[in-house]
Image: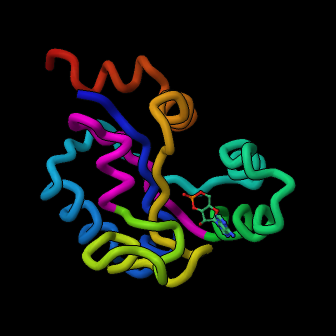
Amino acid sequence: MNRTLAIIKPDAVENHRSGAILAHLEREGFVVRAARLVRLSRAEAEAFYEVHRGRAFYPDLVEFMTSGPCLPLVLERDNAVAHYRAVIGATDPAEAAEGTIRKLFAESKGRNAVHGSDSDENATREIGFFFPEHELAGLWGQA
Ligand code: CMP
């Protein structure tokens, strides 16, 4: 079992697609280990997407990710990073395969419904960005 960080982005939250996307992910065998509805500040969005700083789309990306609440999730299943990326499809919904989350729910390359970690290393960093280790442990510890 391993984990990935997913974000249901502001477009999908605003369009009331969070439930449908969560159902899709659970049908795919992902277990939701943590979830939080958050409104990112500009500084937080810039830091989260630091790797893209300098790219032409970076200002629009930061603007969009701060435009409303989003829903970061820690998802668990075997081969989590690769399986999640297959389930969400290509970044641009016009290129995403039929039945993928972005094909079903995304509007455009920018407003593309969901984010996903692209490697185990980044999954660890991105999970830590939203969910402190002690909080995750507390969620699933003994009641
Ligand atoms: P995400 O998986 O959140 O990672 C970076 C985001 O930048 C990506 O999804 C897209 O929503 C957004 N983006 C906007 N334009 C581009 C582009 N030209 N190439 C890659 N990503 C883009």
Nearest the viewer among 36 and 24 is: 24
Q: Is residue 27 above or below residue 108?
A: above
Residue at the image point whose x is 81% and y is 59% from the top: 55
Residue 96 screen position, x and y as percent: 41, 74
State which quarter of the image contains the C terminus: top left
Residue at point 38%, 46% (across, down): 73
In this figure, which colouring scheme has been used for the structure? Answer: rainbow
Image: 69 above or below 28: below
For the residue pair 4 and 36, the one nearer the viewer reads as 4
Left or right: where does residue 41 sit relative to residue 126?
right
- Expressed as whole percent of the image width and height from the top left, the position of residue 86 reads 33, 57
Which residue is farthest right?
54
Question: Ligand 1 is located in which of the four quadrants?
Answer: bottom right
Q: Position of residue 80 (x, y in %)?
A: 30, 40
Residue 10 in the image: x percent, y percent?
A: 52, 69
Picture quadrant of residue 56: bottom right
Q: Is residue 24 above or below residue 143?
A: below
Which quarter of the rendering shows the N terminus?
Answer: top left
When the figure is inspected, residue 131 is found, relative to residue 112, above or below; the finding is above
Find out whether residue 73 is within the magenta segment.
Answer: yes
The number of discs equals 0
Question: Does residue 105 appear to the left or right of 77 in the view shown?
Answer: right
| Image point (25%, 60%), residue name | 22
> Which image quadrant for residue 39?
bottom right
Q: Residue at x 69, y 52 (%)?
A: 45
Residues in magenta, as a range: 68-87
Looking at the image, which is closer to me, 7 or 84? 84
Q: Which quarter of the figure has residue 47?
A: top right
In reply to whether residue 104 is colored magenta, the answer given is: no
